Image: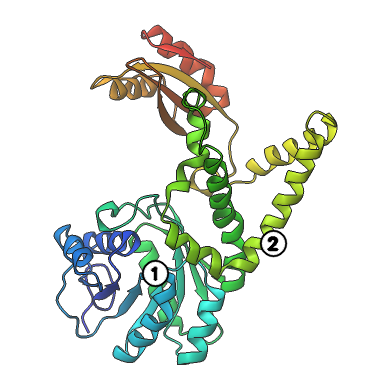
Amino acid sequence: MTSSPSGLPGPVLVIGCGLIGTSAALALSEAGVKVHLEDIRMSNLELAVSRGAGTAEPVDSPSLVIVAVPPADVVATVRRVLADWPGAAVTDVASVKSDLQQQIGRETGSQRYVGSHPMAGSERSGPMAASARLFEGRPWAVTTADGADQDAIDLVVQLAELVGGVPLVMDAPDHDRAVALVSHVPHILSVLTAAQLNGAPGEHLALAGPGLRDVTRIAGSDIALWQDILGANAGQVRAVLQHVREDLDRVIDSIGADTDRLGRVLQSGQDGTRLIPGKHGDKLADLATVFVSVPDRPGELPRLMAHTGEAGVNIEDIRIDHELGRPVGQVEIAVVATSADTLVEALTARGWAAYR
């Protein structure tokens, strides 16, 4: 079997042309991999092919099969794939691994299956939402089981690297505990926050700012998918939610009654934010935000970026919010705290309305 330009020993089959499957296929195709696509929904398959994600032609002998179907269909699909292509390594991209991995192991006994989970996604879904850049710089968990074939593990790690991800090899139970904490419970809290807005007067919602949008953005994600995800990881999610409920009870009891107790809860949240890895996985730096009013017309944002670069200040993060009733956007530029005053002075000198 000849290698592709990417170094993989042969073509890749992607089953499921939704957001994740099509994004992986697009990235692999850009890397020179021959990608074959399959989906029970012909419309998804045709859209993915039209975007250059791969070909709908049948594959003879894939080196790797990526199963990117809904969680409820993963076991049956992996079972079929293992039987159809006895020489291929097989992975899936479902977001919960322990029960899935155990069931596949019991039913197939195959050492060629290696679970994986890219920590990337969007509130949008389907092949038209896919991007070859979706996984760049994002963790890609590779979950191994006892006896798994090392060549298969290496292929899945190589897959993660080829699409721009950062492979992290771990066992399935650790993965499920981790995603309950950093993904599944945050999604529930986003949903619960957004749900409080139902029935709110319009004049109340008019006060909404970027903080509310940040918290509720992921609440718009696919409901059926999240029902599957939360059901599959129910035990780990419940365990984290128990701690959330305890903290919520402390907040309810202490608001207006016990400032010190409330302060301890707020402090624990502030401490937690410092544990989140920063850029490139480094320790999170102390950042400050510089606010800049930007006219809502073409060319203004690139001009602001150029002036920031001329000031010798590196942008750590950026977001834009539009001011209510005015053709002006407010750009929030996060920079290392020690550079914030320098940036404000430089932008002000160039005519921008900047402050921190």
Q: Is residue 24 above or below residue 272?
A: below
Instruction: Measure the C-alpha gap from mark 2 to mark 1.
Output: 25 Å
Residue 128 image position (x, y, % from top left) = 24, 54
Question: Which of the numbered marks, if any, corresponds to residue 239?
Answer: 2
Residue at the image position 60 percent from the left and 32 percent from the top: 286
Residue 7 image position (x, y, % from top left) = 28, 71
Residue at the image position 45 percent from the left and 90 percent from the top: 110
Regarding residue 166, the answer to whether it shows in the image is: no
Quadrant occupied by the N terminus: bottom left
Instruction: Look at label 2 and name its amino acid.
Output: Ala
Secondary element under disc 1, as helix, strand or loop, is loop
Instruction: Classify 10 Å Cα crowding around label 1: few (below 14), some (14-19), many (20 and above).
Output: some
Q: Is residue 305 left or right of residue 242?
A: left
Q: Is residue 78 left or right of residue 207?
A: left
Q: Is residue 242 left or right of residue 335?
A: right
Q: Is residue 81 above or below residue 179?
A: below
Secondary element under disc 2, as helix, strand or loop, is helix
Residue 15 image position (x, y, % from top left) = 29, 73
Question: Which of the numbered marks, if any, corresponds to residue 294?
Answer: none
Q: Camera-side residue: 256 or 235?
A: 256
Instruction: Look at label 1 and name its amino acid.
Output: Pro
Regarding residue 269, the answer to whether it shows in the image is: yes
Give the residue number, with chain letter if any, for mark 1.
70
**Mark sitting earlier along the chain (2/1):** 1
Q: Camera-side residue: 159 or 36?
A: 36
Q: Is residue 79 left or right of residue 97?
A: left
